[in-house]
Image: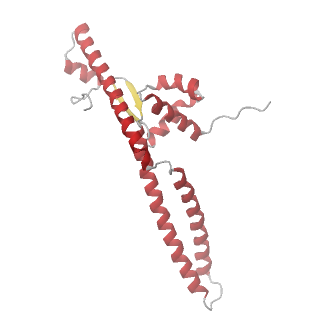
Amino acid sequence: MSKRKGLSFEEKRSRMMEIFFETKDVFQLKDLEKIAPKEKGITSISVKEVLQSLVDDTLVDTDRIGTSNYFWAFPSKALHVRKQKLEKLESQLIERTERKQSLHQRIEKAEMGRQNTEDRAALSKELEGLRQERNRLKAEVEKYKECDPEVVEEIRQLNRIAKDAANRWTDNVFTIKSWAKKKFGFEQKQIDKTFGIPEDFDYID
């Protein structure tokens, strides 16, 4: 019986995003370290590294409330990030294609009645490098074809769900603040300062 192959890093990233998109919820690291292995097959020891890579790529948002860090990702944000990257790649592809055409013209001109020169050899080498870069960019662009405008309507519905989830968490924060004020006699400003809650913290309209 063959040994089961582990998930690649990109597969782990993709499955981690599925957790956020499917639940439309906000998590702490400890929550994800419990959920990811059970539901997505991501080892708990790699959860932190995978999560940090998604935060670094701005696919997952994070904020600190009190002494805890919270993480969330909404489909609308992910779609926007992918579209931006797709536009950048397409722009690079156009630039490389124009550069390639320019080099072709220069090589053809250089070949007219001339022997091989160092300049022509350098141009040929640069052209080959641009061909490889163009192929790489084409493959990269294909990865982002999923950002089709047809998903916009679905994203709008997901935005509503995400807003409701955010407001539920906001309601929880207000409930905890009210409890702390009654239980310990803390002033609201003291609670906000202690737990890093901004003055304009409120529900999303």
- Is residue 76 in view from this perspective? no
At a point 52% along the width and 55% down the height, the residue shown is 141
Q: Quadrant of residue 173?
A: top left
Q: Name the foreground residue: 13 vs 53.
A: 13
- Is residue 53 in view from this perspective? yes
Q: Name the foreground residue: 54 vs 203.
A: 203
Outermost residue toward the top? 183
Quarter holding the C terminus? top left
Q: Is residue 186 above or below residue 107?
A: above
Outermost residue toward the right? 1
- How far across and how far down the image is residue 37, in percent? 58, 25
At a point 27% along the width and 31% down the height, the residue shown is 204
- How far across and how far down the image is residue 23, in percent? 45, 28
In the image, 192: left or right of 136?
Answer: left
At a point 27% along the width and 26% down the height, the residue shown is 197
- How far across and how far down the image is residue 12, in percent? 57, 36
Tell me which colouring the rendered structure shows. Answer: secondary structure
At a point 47% along the width and 66% down the height, the residue shown is 94
Quarter holding the N terminus? top right
- How far across and how far down the image is residue 148, in percent? 46, 49
Q: Is residue 74 above or below residue 178?
A: below
Q: Is residue 10 above or below residue 200?
A: below
Q: Quadrant of residue 88?
A: bottom left
